[in-house]
Image: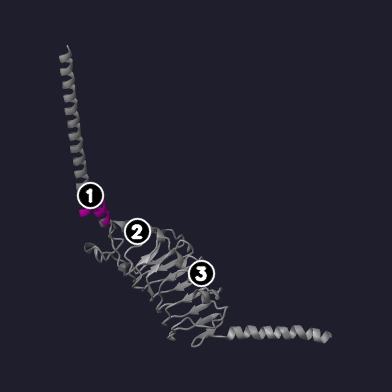
Amino acid sequence: MSSSGRSWPLSLMFLLGVGMASERTSCPSRCSCQYLEVNCTGQQLQEFPEAIPLDTRQLILAANNVSYLPAVELSFLADLVYLDCRKNLLGDDLDFTFIGVAKLVYLDLSFNNLTQVTFSTFSHLLSLVVLKISDNPNLVAIEKDAFANNTWLRHLDVSRTGLMFLDTSTVRDLPNLRFLGLSDNLWHCNCSFLDFITWMTESNVHFSDADNITCYTPEGLRALKMPAVEAQLHFNCLTQLYKRDYIFLCLIGFCIFFAGTVAAWLAGICAVIYEVHTSKREEEEDTVT
């Protein structure tokens, strides 16, 4: 009995060991797997691969044709810290996609078809340090509070997208931001963008490829570097009036003139009525006497 008692835990340990070994050695088709890493680069995958080991820490899906990241399958990879999805077909709605990979530190979504970034896109990635969403030509909008929860973010790249505007608070309120890529975008350097350009000149953030961070519109400022254009924008916005401003001032002047004319007309009518009423009363008194 004592020998059988000793053999039971040994056999159990053997079965557990086989199970753990099989889990570690499982690998998605057409992918290569090393310790805690799964690499599926350039395998022309159409969908998110199956049978990814649950203890995977680094997942590389670069240079494929994946158009959708399933949130449920991703959530099984709770220990994932590195995800490289560059050069795929990801686009449209990524909200809540990364809700189950809260430990993610590095995320590369460059060279895809992203169209917008909302608060719900990356709000669950509280440990995110590096985020690359460059080379998404259809990316035209990043919400003001899109990175509000990503306070550990140090590296953010939004170069070569369709962005024309970025709210200052979107990046100014990131306490650990040290690197920001903004080059080759369609920046519209108007008075609404002046606050962002001023922040660029005053911040300690490093801007990569700074020579290509230029204004695209208006025509008079095209190809001018954004930090250097600050002085000209200050002059344009603080001393010059646009056509709509002149129209607004003309409308205000007309309203004031019209209101004054109406007030004077009413005052005249009141004065005439008072005079007529006073004359009639005097005539009545003379008649009585």
At label 3, the amino acid type is Ile
Circle 2 Cα neighbour tier, 10 Å, few/some/many (<14 / 14–19 / ≥20): many
**Would residue 242 be visible to someone looking at this image?**
no
- The percent position of residue 164, horizontal first and vertical second, equals 31, 65
The disc at residue 196 is: 2
**In the image, is residue 238 part of the stretch drawn in magenta?**
yes
Q: Is residue 1 above or below residue 182?
A: below
At label 1, the amino acid type is Phe
Nearest to the eye among marks 2 and 1: give it: 1
Count of numbered labels shown in the rendering: 3
Precedes in sequence: disc 1 or disc 3: 3
Q: Is residue 85 above or below residue 170?
A: below
- Relative placement, left or right, of 22 versus 73 is right
For disc 3, the marked residue is 99
Q: Secondary structure under badge 2?
A: helix
**Residue name at image x 48 percent, y 62 percent:** 149
For disc 1, the marked residue is 248
In this orientation, which residue lies closer to the viewer: 50 or 231? 50
Name the quadrant containing residue 78.
bottom right
In this orientation, which residue lies closer to the viewer: 148 or 131? 148
- Please identify the quadrant where the C terminus is shown: top left
Circle 1 Cα neighbour tier, 10 Å, few/some/many (<14 / 14–19 / ≥20): few
**In the image, is residue 232 part of the stretch drawn in magenta?**
no
Q: Which residues are magenta?
A: 233-246
- The percent position of residue 153, horizontal first and vertical second, equals 46, 65
Name the quadrant containing residue 218.
bottom left
